[in-house]
Image (cartoon, rainbow, N blue to C red):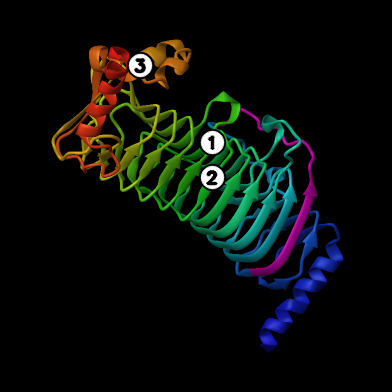
Amino acid sequence: MVLRGLFLLIGIAAVSALGAEVVINTPGYYRGVVADRLVINASGVWLEDVTVRGGYREVPLPQTMTAYRVKPAVGCLVVAGRNVTITNLRLDCAAGLLIFNSSGVVVRGFEARGPVEMAVYKRGLGIYVYNSTDVRVEGGSLYGFHDCVYVEYSRNVFLDGLRAQGCRYGVHVMFSEGVSIKNSMVSDSYVGFAVMYTKNASVVNASAVGNRAWAEGYGILLAELSGVVRGCKAVDNVHGIYVLYWGGTRVLVEGCVISGNYFGITLRGRNATGVEFVGNVIRGNVVEVDHMGVGEEAPAALFRGNLWGGHASPSPYYYASAFSDLMTATEGALAYLAASPARFVIDAAMGRPIAYDPAPRPDERAPPYLLLLALLLVPLVWKSR
């Protein structure tokens, strides 16, 4: 306790001396830091009860790198060190936390709010993890950034218990390895969770709900990755789960609920031999599976043991759709027809097989066949009267 108290006094002295922009260059324990901007250039730092209110100055995102150019001004809170822990953090900035060239960083218990009144392209990033290893971000909420969380060129990053809303991307991962996303939710954004060009990724118990911004929207977007998506929910988005593949995608989607979307599953690209959907609930989407193949008539993705809405038996299930092609070509102009009962007649007569499940799980909510037959006969009986 004596040593911790000494560190606290050192921290208070440093904060008091540096005013609105605080720079921490020595290890220690700091509590109650309030600043317009905070930079941590030391290792072995513990901060608690931190408030950074950098304001809502415009932060344009340059195009000189693959994604974003990293410079210290990108974040109102910058971490560049090893073994840094921040708990109970509040950010009120156009550009939030930058973790840069760091390792062993833990951020736990935070609230970050961006400039919702600004156009999206003028906003900064809520949390940006760049070229860092062994980073944990846990138990926080983010609202109103360009990307709420962006991870790039990093390894062993763990994101747990996050809530993101009103962003372009909720959680965005690129060019990384060993990234884990758990127990998190993204809503009212353009993309919920996006994991692209990343190895050994996992998205577990995550929910993407109501992502329909800018007349488009993706619940879970996957591209050229290896990993697993397990126990997730993709509900009420334009695209529930969107998989982009060019031969390098190896992903298992297992035990997820994909429901109430315009397109439940969208498969786009060529050579989807490493894409598997196992034991999911696929129900109540206008188009259950959409296929936009490049030089392939049917997707090579594997479907097994899924529950398909309306399919009440364990017999093999073929999902056929004429609207998958039509709506891709017309960009949704036939949406009104796709949502009408007539689409089932058209699919039965003209639909192209898109998904084959050899051993589906029966849908217990599906109406019995005899009831369906009776409902079909009602108009005929009524007309004969």
Which residue appears at 25% of the width and 38% of the height?
276
Q: In the rendering, at what x and y percent does residue 385 appear?
A: 30, 15
Amino acid type shown at disc 1: Asn
N-terminal label among 2 and 3: 2
How packed mark 1 is, by other alpha carbons closer than 10 Å (few <14, some 14-19, many 20 or more), is many
Left or right of 361: which side holds 175?
Answer: right
**Image quadrant in which the N terminus is located:** bottom right
Quadrant of residue 328 within the rendered picture: top left
N-terminal label among 2 and 1: 2
Query: Is label 3 in a helix, a strand or a loop?
Result: helix
Amino acid type shown at disc 3: Ala
Q: Nearer the viewer, mark 3 or mark 1?
A: 3
Which residue appears at 66% of the width and 70% of the height?
27
Amino acid type shown at disc 2: Val
The residue to which callout 1 is attached is 211
> Looking at this view, is 182 or 122 the one in front?
182
The residue to which callout 3 is attached is 342
Label 2 vs label 3: CA separation?
A: 34 Å
Does 13 appear above or below 241?
Answer: below
> Looking at this view, is 350 or 32 the one in front?
350
Query: Is label 1 in a helix, a strand or a loop?
Result: loop
Label 2 vs label 1: CA separation?
A: 8 Å
Which residue appears at 21% of the width and 42% of the height?
362
Identity of the residue furthest to the bottom in this view: 2
Left or right of 36: which side holds 100?
Answer: left
Does 371 appear above or below 255?
Answer: above
How packed mark 3 is, by other alpha carbons closer than 10 Å (few <14, some 14-19, many 20 or more), is few
The residue to which callout 2 is attached is 186
Q: In the rendering, at what x and y percent does residue 290 appear?
A: 34, 24
Which region is colored magenta? 46-65
